[in-house]
Structures are given as structure tokens and as C-alpha cells.
Image (tube, rainbow, N blue to C red):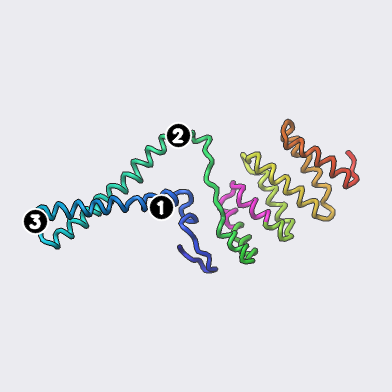
Amino acid sequence: MIADEDGYKKTLFDKRGPEAAQFNQIVSSLIIPIVAGGFIGGALAAKRDLSAPLVVVSALAGAILLGTCWWYFVSRVSRSAGAVFGEFIQPTGNRTPYEPQYSEQDAMVMRGEVARALASYEEIILSSPNDPRPRIRAADLYAKNGQRDRAEALYKAVQRLPGIAAKDDVYVSNRLVDLYLQWSDREARALTELRRLIDTYPESDVAERARKGLANLKRQLGATE
């Protein structure tokens, strides 16, 4: 693991993402072929009555050769076969993409370094302009720490992203409702967000829950249509 300047140790999963597990499996599977290659090389050298140093060299050569062949087979041939099989049982269009865990930013928050975590999220947002996830996580953190203006701006930015997933759209609308209800003189905007959910998803459970929330909120605020 590599430690950055604030002491956070980046793991293999931070650096390689979902490929880390496959990498670990390949490395662990090398033990048997390396041992077997060394045994075979040493045995062949001994059978030819070679000197002890040459037996050792042959054992090392056998270990390296068989280990390399095994690495190539597992990392190339086996991966290709697995990809073909994976496409058969789960087409690409239905596969769940890898989602970053943002463990480095979470560690900063756990240490109370909220400003640094937010700055890090802002950098990720700049480098990933169409990714809703860093915006959502940053907005949640801004809202939690009372920075409502920036939280609102980021939630709204997510709503404007092209091809935004329904789950993300619904999530940010609900978070905006929560934000407005805790924000003096902005409570009425929560009504707008609930109406937006009803209009966007009219025949869904989302709309049904939004209608109930709208009715309850209107009673609380004393609002009328």
C-alpha cells in the first residue's frame, strides 16, 4: 500500500478497482505451477547427471518457464473465455458498471478533514463532468455541513446531466426536498420538487409517495394550490 501526504494508505482496490480481485487470484494461483516447474526442471537435470549448480539453475528455469506460461494462460486465455461466457449469460447492456467507492475521501471525512474531502470531490467533478456520483456525494457532504447553496447547485447539476438514471434523479429530488425543509424561506421549493417527481414519473410508486408528501407538506406550510 502507498501512503499519501495525509497518511491515507491507498489499497490495491483503490488503484486497480474491480481488477484487483482477479489480480490477487492470479498471483495466488502461481504457487503450484512455480513449485511444479522447479521440481520438473531439477528432476530432468538430475536425470542427466548434471552438476548440482546446473540442477539448481534448471530448477529455477523450470519454475520461471512454467510460472510464466501459467500467468499468460490465466490472464489472457482464461480471461477471454470468461468474457465470452459472461457476454452469453449477461450481455454488456445489462451489466452493472463498477462504481468507485471514494474510500480516500471517506477516510478524510472520518478524520474530520471535511474541507479536504470536499476539495477532492470538486477535483473529481471537474475531471468527470458527466458522472453524477461525485456530485451527489459532495452535495450530501455540503448539505450535512450546512453549505446549502453549493449542495443545491450540485443537486441541480445532477438533474441536468444527459442520460441521468432515474434512481439518481429521484434521489437528488428527495435530497432537495430535505434541504429546502431545513432552509428558512426555501420551504416552498420543496413543493416544486415534489410536483416535479409527480410530473416526471406519473404512473410509478415514486409519484404516489410524492403525492402523499405533497399533501402533508401543504398542510404543514398552509399552502394552497
Of callouts 2 and 3, which one flags the residue occurring earlier in the amino acid sequence? 3
Secondary structure type for disc 1:
helix
Q: Earlier in the sequence, mark 1 or mark 2?
A: 1
Image-quadrant location for residue 215: top right
Left or right? Give the position of 84 relative to 148.
Answer: left
Between residue 160 and residue 181, name the one nearer to us.
181
Please tell me which residue is depicted at 59% across the width and 47% down the height of the picture.
131
The outermost residue toward the left is: 49
Q: Which residue is mark 3?
A: 49
Instruction: Rate crowding at label 3 as few (under 14), some (14 to 19) or many (20 or more) other CA atoms within 10 Å.
Output: few
Q: Residues within 10 Å of mark 2 (few under 14, many from 20)?
A: some
Q: CA distance from mark 2 to mark 3?
A: 52 Å
Q: CA distance from mark 1 to mark 2?
A: 23 Å
On residue 24, the disc is 1
Depth-wise, is mark 1 or mark 2 nearer the camera? 1
Q: Is residue 78 left or right of residue 207?
A: left
Nearest to N terminus: mark 1 or mark 3? 1
Q: Residue at x 60, y 53 (%)?
A: 125
Which mark, residue 16? none
User: Foreground: 135 or 204?
Assistant: 204
Residue 144: x %, y % from top left: 71, 58
Which amino acid lies under the numbered mark 3 shown in the image of this protein?
Asp
Residue in front for this viewpoint, 64 or 38: 38
Region in magenta: 122-140
Quadrant where the C terminus sits is top right
- What's the magenta bit mostly, secondary-structure-wise? helix
